[in-house]
């Protein structure tokens, strides 16, 4: 893989990890049609995911710090209610992550086989378009994420679990699931991004043995993909939050439908 290809793949990762169009689906189709990424190692993919993980951590650094402080603030003070809400948020993030983990344990191996089926991936991208389109028309019932309750957090976590399928957008499904259960739009966006932290971290930890294969002579290529994913991902987060609040995600649905349909046509005539 060349330095330029690494940057290109990092840009794709940064763009598609957060906007609801499926980063994994794009990489599968890019590999199928252009051969981009077919020679990339799992280590390079881990570096790109770490780049998007860092983007979330940096963007939400103040919120993450507040959540952390609230875990150790149990005194009866003026901020007691704020700390209670923050602790609730942490609890629901944990519950949702467990829901994701259960889906992965049950279906993870089966889902991985889909990576070798670009036609199925194209169809799933079309499905993502339908999910994203519907999310714009879900009514905001104004429930704060800190009061979502057990079953809402479970359903959001399960939806993230099914986004292991390449072609199904993680952000699209978690945001749609949040809105469907009545979570207010801004909180749905924040919860989705925060939920990506343990998901991406767990995916990297599960492949920890791959780092033993790190080729130091190619480290500059890995870092290029990492930095590209981080920079692009950071700016995409702010952009996407504004779109979620204004119910303008439907434009990504049009893109998913076009990409999925065009891919199927090209596969049929290839």
Image (tube, rainbow, N blue to C red):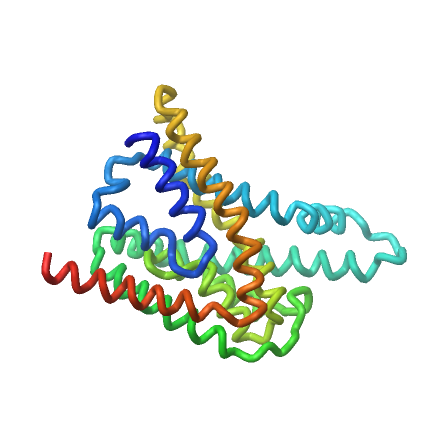
Q: Where residue 136 appears, x then y in whole percent?
A: 49, 74
Instruction: Quarter of the image for the C terminus: give it.
Output: bottom left
Q: Nearer the viewer, residue 270 or 85?
A: 270
In this view, which residue lies farthest toward the right? 77
Left or right, 199 with respect to 87, comes to left
Q: Residue at x 63, y 69 (%)?
A: 148
Q: Nearer the viewer, residue 239 or 214?
A: 239
Residue 141 falls in image quadrant: bottom right
Above or below, 265 against 16 in this view is below
Instruction: Quarter of the image for the N terminus: give it.
Output: top left
User: Could you tell me how many numbered marks the image carries?
Assistant: 0
Q: Nearer the viewer, residue 25 or 102?
A: 25
Residue 34 falls in image quadrant: top left
Q: Where residue 145 appears, x then y in whole percent?
A: 64, 66
Left or right, 127 with respect to 270, comes to right
Q: Residue at x 81, y 62 (%)?
A: 81
Q: Residue at x 43, y 51 (%)?
A: 15
Q: Where residue 107 appears, x then y in whole percent?
A: 35, 58
Q: Where residue 147 appears, x then y in whole percent?
A: 68, 69
Above or below, 211 against 150 in this view is above
In this view, which residue lies farthest toward the left? 269
Left or right, 185 with respect to 77, comes to left
Q: Residue at x 51, y 52 (%)?
A: 236
Left or right, 124 with respect to 87, comes to left
Above or below, 120 against 231 in this view is below
């Amino acid at each position: 893989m060349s330095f330029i290809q690494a940057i290109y793949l990092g840009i794709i990762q940064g763009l598609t990890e957060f906007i609801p169009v499926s980063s994994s689906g794009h990489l599968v189709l890019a590999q199928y049609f252009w051969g981009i990424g077919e020679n990339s190692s799992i280590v390079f993919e881990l570096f790109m995911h770490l780049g998007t993980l860092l983007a979330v951590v940096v963007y939400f650094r103040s919120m993450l710090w507040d959540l952390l402080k609230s875990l150790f603030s149990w005194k009866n003070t003026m901020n007691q209610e704020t700390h209670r809400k923050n602790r609730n948020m942490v609890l629901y993030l944990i519950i949702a992550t467990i829901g994701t983990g259960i889906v992965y344990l049950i279906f993870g191996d089966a889902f991985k086989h889909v990576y070798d089926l670009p036609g199925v991936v194209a169809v799933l991208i079309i499905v993502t378009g339908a999910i994203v389109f519907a999310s714009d028309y879900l009514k905001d019932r104004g429930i704060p994420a800190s009061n979502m309750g057990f079953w809402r957090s479970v359903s959001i976590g399960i939806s993230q679990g099914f986004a292991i399928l390449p072609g199904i957008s993680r952000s699209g499904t978690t945001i749609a699931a949040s809105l469907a259960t009545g979570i207010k739009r801004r909180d749905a966006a924040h919860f989705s991004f925060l939920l990506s932290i343990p998901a991406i971290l767990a995916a990297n930890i599960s492949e920890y043995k791959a780092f033993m294969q790190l080729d130091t002579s190619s480290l500059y290529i890995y870092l290029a993909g990492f930095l590209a994913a981080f920079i692009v991902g950071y700016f995409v987060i702010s952009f996407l939050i504004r779109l979620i609040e204004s119910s303008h995600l439907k434009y990504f649905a049009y893109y998913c439908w076009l990409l999925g349909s065009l891919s199927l046509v090209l596969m049929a005539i290839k």
